[in-house]
Image (tube, grey):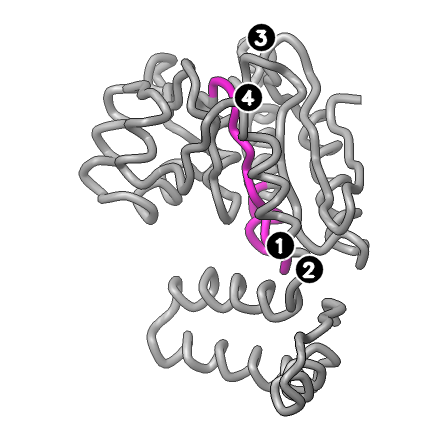
Amino acid sequence: MAINLKQDGLVGVITMDAPPVNSYDVPMLHELQKAIHEARLDDGMRALVVESALPKFFSAGADIKTLQNSSPAEFSNLLTIAHETMDMIENTPKIVIAAISGHALGGGLEMALACDFRFAKDAKYQLGLVEINLGLNPAMGGTQRLPRIISRSLALHMIATGETIDPATAHSRGILDRLIPEDDFDDEVMAYASRLAEGPTLAQGMAKLSINKGTEASLAEGLAIERSHQNFLFKSDDAAEGVNAFVNKRKPEFKGR
């Protein structure tokens, strides 16, 4: 199996394990889709982490040999499945953290961009959208997600040149949310995910969807999405618990429902 899903406390951990560089093909994307689907439906996994089992690579993107041997129809199918997979991450109403501890190149970085947070180990490796070196463009969402995270001109520069950068530079540009010392990386990622998982995760998920859907719409449409989600949350057990705990001056015990 190239993709493994396990539970660590209240956190679901999706691990890529496809040596030597976690390059993806259609079967691997199908495995990733299955893991995301299972984690989405499992109430015991209230926050998610996507990581790599390989010490030097998060992912190097699409398998070049697969591209070389693909017909135009097969290539188009790969792109469709890749987009569907990233959309699953983006539309899952749970917070998803990309834990990057090695090279994230091409589709590997695009996968991280589809996650809600990108936490990176402060070590020697490179990140970049390098598809231009093949005469191609990023096509796992990179042309759309990167310029929504950093400036449009800087995103175009990175895509048009295939520039690779180290984690410190990626953090300074806003691509990475946290740069964590190497010795503390695993513990800090799981500590943050666990804190989220112990909180009102239903509300967290609705906030994620409100932001993701609302910022792609007009302000009026975004506000309508926000109202809809808030009305849904008001009827939840967590909202009742949160209000009751506040009134009674005690710590709330959220269940994520």
Amino acid marked by disc 3: Lys
Q: Residue at x 47, y 23 (%)?
A: 104
Q: Earlier in the sequence, mark 3 or mark 2?
A: 3
Amino acid marked by disc 2: Glu
Q: Distance from label 3 to label 4 (Cα)?
A: 15 Å
Q: Distance from label 1 to label 2 (Cα)?
A: 5 Å
Q: Which residue, given by chain and number where applicable, does mark 3 sit on?
A: 65
Residue 41, image x, y percentages: 79, 56
Q: Distance from label 1 to label 4 (Cα)?
A: 27 Å
Residue 179, image x, y percentages: 41, 33
Above or below, 131 against 79 in this view is: above
Give the foreground label among 1 and 3.
1
Figure quadrant of the C terminus: bottom right
Above or below, 131 against 209 in this view is: above
Q: Is residue 100 left or right of residue 217?
A: right
Q: Which residue, given by chain and number where applicable, does mark 2 sit on?
A: 198
Q: Residue at x 46, y 82 (%)?
A: 224
Density class for disc 1 (Cα within 10 Å; few <14, some 14-19, many ≥20) is few
Amino acid marked by disc 4: Ser
SS at circle 4: strand
